[in-house]
Image (tube, rainbow, N blue to C red):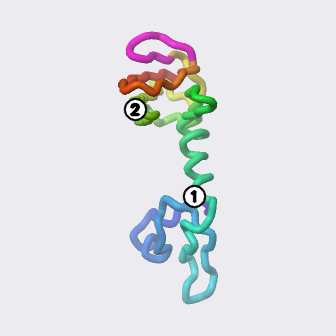
Amino acid sequence: MINPIEHARTKEAAQKYKVEPYVIAADIYGAKNLIGRGGWTWYTGSSSWFYKAGIQYILGLKIEKGIMKFSPCIPKDWKEYKIKYKWKKSMYNIKVENPNGKNSGISEIYMNNKLIENAIKLESQEKVYNIRIIM
């Protein structure tokens, strides 16, 4: 019920909900003529928390004090996903592969084809870093 995408699974549901399916609504009306309609979507802090939950706790991209770490927690049937992350002038192209159908855990991380630890110091130089994570 909290996940806004659940209110847009069908065309009819989206027409009833009437607000963005990617932002958590502060209200879902219950009055007979408005029942199921969302309201106050961008006026709450819930959208930023939803974003944080998606990026940090599902995709697993965590940055603290200039260090990037990964800790994905995804559905087993996700085979891969990609993230593009820009830090100052640098671009980090991140590809997470899940060949064994895991929910979490990382086996190996490569940056520009070199095996590395799960703690990448972010660089401000104008460079491109290709990161491959194997779960």
Which x, y percent locates residue 59?
53, 37
Measured as percent of width and height from the top left, residue 17 is found at: 50, 73
**Residue at coordinates 43% horizontally, 22% vertically from top-left?**
132
Q: Nearer the viewer, residue 126 or 118?
A: 126
Query: Counting residues from the N terminus, which is met first, the one under dot 2 or under dot 1?
Result: 1
Q: Is residue 113 magenta?
A: yes
- Residue 26 visible in the shown view: yes
* The quadrant where residue 81 appears: top left
What amino acid type should be assigned to the residue bearing mark 1? Ser
Describe residue 49's horizontal placement relative to residue 110 as left or right.
Answer: right
Q: Position of residue 91 (x, y in %)?
A: 39, 31
Q: Residue at x 48, y 77 (%)?
A: 16
The total of numbered circles placed on residues is: 2
Local crowd size for mark 1, using a 10 Å CA cut-off: few (<14), some (14–19), many (≥20):
some
Residue 69 in view, yes or no:
no
Residue at which label 2 appears: 89
Residue 47's mark? Answer: 1
Task: Characterize the magenta stretch by its predominant secondary structure.
Answer: strand
Q: Quadrant of residue 14?
A: bottom left
For numbered disc 1, what is the local secondary structure?
helix
Q: Is residue 14 magenta?
A: no
Residue 123 lies left or right of residue 31; in this view the side is: left
Please tell me which residue lies in front, 85 or 135.
Answer: 85
Separation of residues labelled 2 and 1 (CA atoms): 27 Å
**Mark 2 or 1, closer to the camera:** 2
**Coordinates of residue 114 in the picture (x, y in percent):** 43, 10
Query: Could you tell me which residue is drawn at 54 percent across and 21 percent down?
Result: 120
The residue at the point 59 percent across, 35 percent down is: 73
The magenta span reads 109-117
Foreground of the two, 78 or 3: 3
